[in-house]
Amino acid sequence: MGRWVVDTVLPPTDDTDLFTQLTFLDEPCCASCGYPFDHEVTGLAGISAFDLLCAACLARRPAYATARSALQYDDASRSLVLAFKHGGHTDRLHTFAAQMHRAGRVALAHADLIVPVPLHRTRLVKRRYNQSALLARALSRRCGVPMDAHMLLRPRKTPSQGGLSAAGRRRNVQGAFEVARPEAVAGRRLVLVDDVMTTGATLEACTRTLKRAGAARVDALCLARVVKPLPAP
């Protein structure tokens, strides 16, 4: 895991100390889910760092081609993410999009369309905006890849994922999504955008829905991700 200098508009002066505490994620990481490795990978003859997988992805490869996240979701980033997600603080979108563009630069370079993870209409009314759609729109403006906030729908209302186990999260979102116009995603390379990746259950459910509709490839890109310590050998 490396620390990167924010390459765009800096936050207000009183937030600068907070930004210096953030962990910005990049390589080396799992080639599939983006789980950050602690050290550079060297000395493995015939194996590229781009081919290395974490233990979880070796055991069960995700449905998406790759997943990348800009920040580690921890004590330092939690207040920023929650202020954006629930507090209406959208003033840092330009900075968030810049870091997501950095983290997802490989997938975005070959993408046809950016698709945000949708909210159910009742949650959208309560929250007033879909934070994933705001991130997707800001990212689209930055990288030039078009986005469609209405391509993926969430017709089934699901309880909050908070407090659920990984298996419970997968069951909770099973069948929750559908594609509005399958002909518009058929054969296309998509980047799926969400705010926080915890277990990846929501990204998995969305990806499977998009691929059933004919998407050629789905990569996932998040603002932040939870990084749980790997078990000791």
Image (spheres, rainbow, N blue to C red):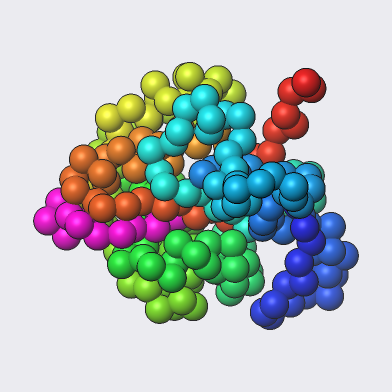
Report the side of 218 relative to 19 (left or right).
left
Q: Residue furthest left?
A: 183
Nearer the observer, 74 or 43: 43
Quadrant in which residue 202 is drawn: top left
**Residue 75 seen:** yes
At a point 75% along the width and 31% down the height, the residue shown is 229
At a point 50% along the width and 65% down the height, the residue shown is 106
Q: Is residue 168 above or below residue 52?
A: above
Q: Position of residue 40 (x, y in %)?
A: 76, 52
Report the side of 124 relative to 36 (left or right).
left
At a point 69% along the width and 39% down the height, the residue shown is 227
Q: Position of residue 228 (x, y in %)?
A: 70, 33
Q: Residue furthest front?
A: 45
Quadrant in which residue 176 is drawn: top left
Report the side of 176 relative to 48 (left or right).
left
Q: Is residue 20 magenta?
A: no
Quadrant in which residue 184 is drawn: bottom left
Q: Is residue 192 above or below residue 158?
A: below
Report the side of 148 relative to 212 (left or right).
right
Q: How many marks?
A: 0
Q: Position of residue 109 (x, y in %)?
A: 43, 70
Q: Position of residue 139 (x, y in %)?
A: 48, 70
Quarter of the rendering occupied by the C terminus: top right
- Read off the magenta span: 182-195
Q: Is residue 47 above or below residue 147?
A: above
**Residue 73 seen:** no
At a point 47% along the width and 27% down the height, the residue shown is 60
